[in-house]
Amino acid sequence: MADTSKEHLLHLIKRLSHTISNLFESHSIGAVAGLAIAIFFTWRLLRSPGEPQRRQRKRQAATSSSPGVSTHSNASVVPSGVGSSSADSRAQNVVDELFQPVKPTLGQIVRQKLSEGRKVTCRLLGVILEETSPEELQKQATVKSSVLEVLLEITKFCDLYLMEQVLDDESEKRVLGALEDAGVFTSGGLVKDKVLFCGTENGRSSFVRQLEPDWHIDSNPEVISQLARFIKYQLHVSPVRSERAAANVFSAPSLEQFFGSI
Protein backbone atom coordinates (compact mmCIF):
# COMPACT_ATOMS: atom_id res chain seq x y z
CA MET A 1 0.00 0.00 0.00
CA ALA A 2 2.91 2.34 0.71
CA ASP A 3 4.13 1.92 -2.87
CA THR A 4 0.67 2.74 -4.19
CA SER A 5 0.56 5.86 -2.04
CA LYS A 6 3.93 6.98 -3.37
CA GLU A 7 2.78 6.43 -6.95
CA HIS A 8 -0.32 8.57 -6.33
CA LEU A 9 1.83 11.30 -4.79
CA LEU A 10 4.31 11.26 -7.69
CA HIS A 11 1.40 11.44 -10.14
CA LEU A 12 0.00 14.48 -8.32
CA ILE A 13 3.38 16.20 -8.29
CA LYS A 14 3.73 15.68 -12.06
CA ARG A 15 0.23 17.09 -12.65
CA LEU A 16 0.94 20.12 -10.48
CA SER A 17 4.26 20.72 -12.24
CA HIS A 18 2.53 20.62 -15.65
CA THR A 19 -0.21 22.93 -14.38
CA ILE A 20 2.32 25.44 -13.00
CA SER A 21 4.04 25.58 -16.39
CA ASN A 22 0.75 26.25 -18.21
CA LEU A 23 -0.30 28.91 -15.71
CA PHE A 24 2.88 30.93 -15.99
CA GLU A 25 2.67 30.77 -19.79
CA SER A 26 -0.88 32.16 -19.63
CA HIS A 27 0.22 34.99 -17.26
CA SER A 28 -3.03 34.58 -15.28
CA ILE A 29 -2.86 36.03 -11.74
CA GLY A 30 -6.18 34.45 -10.85
CA ALA A 31 -5.00 31.04 -12.00
CA VAL A 32 -1.77 31.32 -9.98
CA ALA A 33 -3.82 32.24 -6.89
CA GLY A 34 -6.00 29.21 -7.55
CA LEU A 35 -2.87 27.07 -7.74
CA ALA A 36 -1.78 28.27 -4.28
CA ILE A 37 -5.19 27.33 -2.87
CA ALA A 38 -5.05 23.91 -4.48
CA ILE A 39 -1.55 23.22 -3.13
CA PHE A 40 -2.71 24.19 0.37
CA PHE A 41 -5.75 21.91 0.30
CA THR A 42 -3.75 19.09 -1.26
CA TRP A 43 -1.20 19.40 1.57
CA ARG A 44 -3.99 19.34 4.16
CA LEU A 45 -5.60 16.29 2.59
CA LEU A 46 -2.29 14.43 2.40
CA ARG A 47 -1.39 15.42 5.96
CA SER A 48 -4.69 14.78 7.70
CA PRO A 49 -4.74 10.94 7.61
CA GLY A 50 -1.53 10.78 9.63
CA GLU A 51 -3.08 12.41 12.69
CA PRO A 52 -5.91 9.85 13.21
CA GLN A 53 -3.37 7.08 12.70
CA ARG A 54 -1.13 8.55 15.43
CA ARG A 55 -4.11 8.88 17.76
CA GLN A 56 -5.10 5.29 16.92
CA ARG A 57 -1.61 4.05 17.81
CA LYS A 58 -1.78 5.94 21.10
CA ARG A 59 -5.14 4.35 21.90
CA GLN A 60 -3.75 0.90 21.03
CA ALA A 61 -0.81 1.45 23.37
CA ALA A 62 -3.12 2.58 26.18
CA THR A 63 -5.38 -0.44 25.65
CA SER A 64 -2.55 -2.95 25.72
CA SER A 65 -1.20 -1.46 28.95
CA SER A 66 -4.57 -1.49 30.76
CA PRO A 67 -5.34 -4.83 32.50
CA GLY A 68 -8.71 -6.40 31.90
CA VAL A 69 -9.42 -4.57 28.68
CA SER A 70 -10.43 -6.82 25.76
CA THR A 71 -7.94 -7.01 22.87
CA HIS A 72 -10.78 -7.66 20.40
CA SER A 73 -11.05 -3.89 19.88
CA ASN A 74 -7.94 -4.10 17.73
CA ALA A 75 -10.04 -5.68 15.00
CA SER A 76 -11.60 -2.29 14.26
CA VAL A 77 -8.27 -0.63 13.53
CA VAL A 78 -8.10 0.78 9.97
CA PRO A 79 -5.44 -1.08 7.93
CA SER A 80 -2.29 0.93 7.27
CA GLY A 81 -2.31 2.74 3.95
CA VAL A 82 -6.10 2.88 3.47
CA GLY A 83 -6.38 6.42 4.83
CA SER A 84 -3.40 7.55 2.76
CA SER A 85 -4.90 6.13 -0.44
CA SER A 86 -8.19 7.89 0.28
CA ALA A 87 -6.35 11.19 0.82
CA ASP A 88 -4.51 10.77 -2.46
CA SER A 89 -7.83 10.27 -4.22
CA ARG A 90 -9.36 13.35 -2.62
CA ALA A 91 -6.27 15.42 -3.38
CA GLN A 92 -6.34 14.35 -7.02
CA ASN A 93 -10.03 15.31 -7.22
CA VAL A 94 -9.12 18.80 -5.97
CA VAL A 95 -6.45 19.14 -8.65
CA ASP A 96 -8.77 17.82 -11.37
CA GLU A 97 -11.55 20.24 -10.45
CA LEU A 98 -9.46 23.37 -9.97
CA PHE A 99 -6.99 22.86 -12.78
CA GLN A 100 -8.63 21.77 -15.96
CA PRO A 101 -6.33 22.17 -19.02
CA VAL A 102 -5.87 25.88 -19.72
CA LYS A 103 -7.18 26.75 -23.17
CA PRO A 104 -4.87 29.26 -24.89
CA THR A 105 -6.37 32.57 -25.97
CA LEU A 106 -6.54 33.60 -29.63
CA GLY A 107 -3.76 36.12 -28.97
CA GLN A 108 -1.49 33.36 -27.63
CA ILE A 109 -2.29 31.16 -30.63
CA VAL A 110 -1.49 34.00 -33.05
CA ARG A 111 1.87 34.68 -31.38
CA GLN A 112 2.74 30.99 -31.36
CA LYS A 113 1.74 30.42 -34.99
CA LEU A 114 3.69 33.46 -36.15
CA SER A 115 6.73 32.27 -34.16
CA GLU A 116 6.82 35.65 -32.40
CA GLY A 117 7.38 37.40 -35.74
CA ARG A 118 7.14 41.18 -35.38
CA LYS A 119 6.47 42.33 -38.97
CA VAL A 120 3.77 40.92 -41.25
CA THR A 121 2.71 41.82 -44.79
CA CYS A 122 -0.60 40.60 -46.15
CA ARG A 123 -2.48 40.88 -49.43
CA LEU A 124 -6.13 41.94 -49.29
CA LEU A 125 -7.88 40.08 -52.12
CA GLY A 126 -8.98 36.58 -51.13
CA VAL A 127 -7.51 36.96 -47.64
CA ILE A 128 -9.04 39.99 -45.92
CA LEU A 129 -11.60 40.84 -48.62
CA GLU A 130 -14.34 38.66 -50.08
CA GLU A 131 -13.38 39.84 -53.58
CA THR A 132 -10.67 37.92 -55.43
CA SER A 133 -9.73 40.17 -58.40
CA PRO A 134 -8.89 43.86 -59.03
CA GLU A 135 -11.85 44.03 -61.43
CA GLU A 136 -14.26 43.22 -58.59
CA LEU A 137 -12.83 46.09 -56.54
CA GLN A 138 -14.04 48.50 -59.20
CA LYS A 139 -17.56 47.62 -58.09
CA GLN A 140 -17.31 46.85 -54.38
CA ALA A 141 -15.03 45.91 -51.48
CA THR A 142 -16.25 43.67 -48.66
CA VAL A 143 -14.23 42.77 -45.55
CA LYS A 144 -14.68 39.18 -44.35
CA SER A 145 -16.35 39.30 -40.94
CA SER A 146 -14.73 35.98 -39.96
CA VAL A 147 -11.21 37.37 -40.36
CA LEU A 148 -11.60 40.51 -38.22
CA GLU A 149 -10.82 38.97 -34.84
CA VAL A 150 -7.61 37.37 -36.09
CA LEU A 151 -6.61 40.53 -37.95
CA LEU A 152 -7.01 42.68 -34.84
CA GLU A 153 -4.99 40.21 -32.75
CA ILE A 154 -2.16 40.39 -35.28
CA THR A 155 -2.14 44.21 -35.10
CA LYS A 156 -1.76 44.07 -31.30
CA PHE A 157 1.81 42.81 -31.41
CA CYS A 158 2.86 42.91 -35.08
CA ASP A 159 3.76 45.71 -37.45
CA LEU A 160 1.16 44.85 -40.10
CA TYR A 161 1.05 46.11 -43.68
CA LEU A 162 -1.86 45.40 -46.02
CA MET A 163 -1.37 45.66 -49.78
CA GLU A 164 -3.20 45.13 -53.04
CA GLN A 165 -3.18 45.62 -56.80
CA VAL A 166 -5.87 48.05 -57.97
CA LEU A 167 -6.89 49.39 -61.36
CA ASP A 168 -7.95 52.93 -60.38
CA ASP A 169 -8.10 55.46 -57.55
CA GLU A 170 -11.76 54.69 -56.88
CA SER A 171 -10.84 51.13 -56.00
CA GLU A 172 -8.36 52.43 -53.43
CA LYS A 173 -11.01 54.61 -51.80
CA ARG A 174 -13.47 51.71 -51.84
CA VAL A 175 -11.01 49.39 -50.07
CA LEU A 176 -10.03 51.97 -47.43
CA GLY A 177 -13.70 52.74 -46.80
CA ALA A 178 -14.52 49.05 -46.31
CA LEU A 179 -11.62 48.60 -43.87
CA GLU A 180 -12.64 51.70 -41.93
CA ASP A 181 -16.29 50.61 -41.73
CA ALA A 182 -15.17 47.21 -40.42
CA GLY A 183 -13.29 48.91 -37.56
CA VAL A 184 -9.82 47.82 -38.64
CA PHE A 185 -8.32 51.25 -37.94
CA THR A 186 -9.93 51.76 -34.53
CA SER A 187 -7.65 49.34 -32.62
CA GLY A 188 -4.63 51.63 -33.03
CA GLY A 189 -2.43 48.86 -34.44
CA LEU A 190 -3.14 49.61 -38.09
CA VAL A 191 -3.29 52.99 -39.83
CA LYS A 192 -4.27 53.92 -43.37
CA ASP A 193 -0.66 54.71 -44.25
CA LYS A 194 0.11 50.99 -43.86
CA VAL A 195 -2.38 50.01 -46.55
CA LEU A 196 -0.37 50.02 -49.76
CA PHE A 197 -1.62 49.94 -53.37
CA CYS A 198 0.17 49.08 -56.61
CA GLY A 199 -0.73 48.50 -60.25
CA THR A 200 0.77 45.02 -60.77
CA GLU A 201 1.46 41.74 -58.99
CA ASN A 202 5.19 42.44 -59.31
CA GLY A 203 4.60 45.72 -57.52
CA ARG A 204 3.25 43.81 -54.52
CA SER A 205 6.27 41.51 -54.52
CA SER A 206 8.51 44.57 -54.60
CA PHE A 207 6.69 46.07 -51.57
CA VAL A 208 7.21 42.85 -49.62
CA ARG A 209 10.92 42.63 -50.38
CA GLN A 210 11.47 46.26 -49.39
CA LEU A 211 9.63 45.82 -46.08
CA GLU A 212 11.48 42.55 -45.26
CA PRO A 213 8.73 41.05 -43.05
CA ASP A 214 9.00 37.96 -40.89
CA TRP A 215 5.80 36.69 -42.54
CA HIS A 216 4.04 37.36 -45.82
CA ILE A 217 0.45 36.19 -46.42
CA ASP A 218 -0.79 35.89 -50.00
CA SER A 219 -3.33 34.05 -52.16
CA ASN A 220 -1.28 34.06 -55.36
CA PRO A 221 0.94 30.93 -55.65
CA GLU A 222 3.27 32.64 -58.11
CA VAL A 223 4.00 35.50 -55.72
CA ILE A 224 4.49 32.98 -52.89
CA SER A 225 6.97 31.03 -55.03
CA GLN A 226 8.91 34.16 -56.05
CA LEU A 227 9.29 35.33 -52.44
CA ALA A 228 10.08 31.96 -50.86
CA ARG A 229 13.84 32.52 -50.86
CA PHE A 230 13.62 36.10 -49.57
CA ILE A 231 11.03 35.90 -46.75
CA LYS A 232 11.48 33.87 -43.58
CA TYR A 233 7.91 32.48 -43.48
CA GLN A 234 4.91 32.66 -45.80
CA LEU A 235 1.28 31.61 -45.63
CA HIS A 236 -0.47 30.66 -48.85
CA VAL A 237 -4.23 31.17 -48.46
CA SER A 238 -6.15 29.04 -50.94
CA PRO A 239 -9.41 27.05 -50.77
CA VAL A 240 -7.71 24.42 -52.95
CA ARG A 241 -4.90 22.48 -51.32
CA SER A 242 -1.71 22.72 -53.34
CA GLU A 243 1.81 21.33 -53.11
CA ARG A 244 4.08 23.05 -50.64
CA ALA A 245 6.25 25.53 -52.51
CA ALA A 246 9.06 25.41 -49.94
CA ALA A 247 9.80 24.34 -46.38
CA ASN A 248 9.10 27.87 -45.12
CA VAL A 249 5.70 28.10 -46.84
CA PHE A 250 2.53 27.06 -45.02
CA SER A 251 -0.96 26.79 -46.46
CA ALA A 252 -4.54 27.10 -45.21
CA PRO A 253 -8.02 27.58 -46.71
CA SER A 254 -8.28 30.94 -44.93
CA LEU A 255 -6.36 33.18 -42.56
CA GLU A 256 -8.74 32.47 -39.69
CA GLN A 257 -8.52 28.69 -40.19
CA PHE A 258 -4.74 28.84 -40.05
CA PHE A 259 -5.06 30.23 -36.52
CA GLY A 260 -7.85 27.84 -35.63
CA SER A 261 -10.36 30.56 -34.70
CA ILE A 262 -13.24 28.82 -36.51
Image: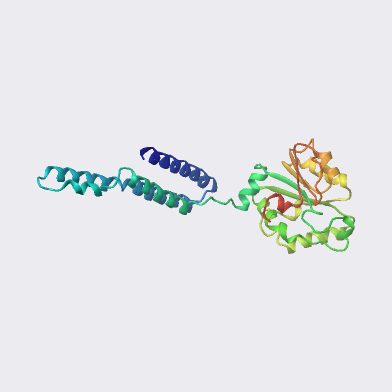
Q: How far across and how far down the image is residue 211, in percent?
A: 76, 42
Residue 253 locus on image (x, y percent): 77, 51
User: Residue 137's x, y, as percent?
Assistant: 86, 59
Between 137 and 103, the one nearer to me in the picture: 103
Q: Is residue 204 left or right of residue 254?
A: right
Identify the residue at image location x=24%, y=47%.
75
Residue pushed farthest top?
Answer: 229
Q: Quadrant of the N terminus?
A: top left
**Any part of residue 7 in sight:** yes
> Height in image: 185 above or below 62?
below
Determine which quarter of the picture holds residue 113.
Answer: top right
Colour mapping used in the image? rainbow
Q: Which residue corresponds to the image point at 64% horizontal and 51% vertical from the top-left?
A: 156
Residue 33 visible here:
no
Picture coordinates of residue 146 (x, y %)?
72, 59
- The residue nearer to you, when weighing 112 against 17, is 17
- Rendering quarter of residue 58: top left
Left or right: 93, with 173 as reference point: left
Q: Nearer the viewer, residue 67 or 255?
A: 67
- Residue located at (19% from left, 44% from top): 60
Quarter of the figure that contains the C terminus:
bottom right
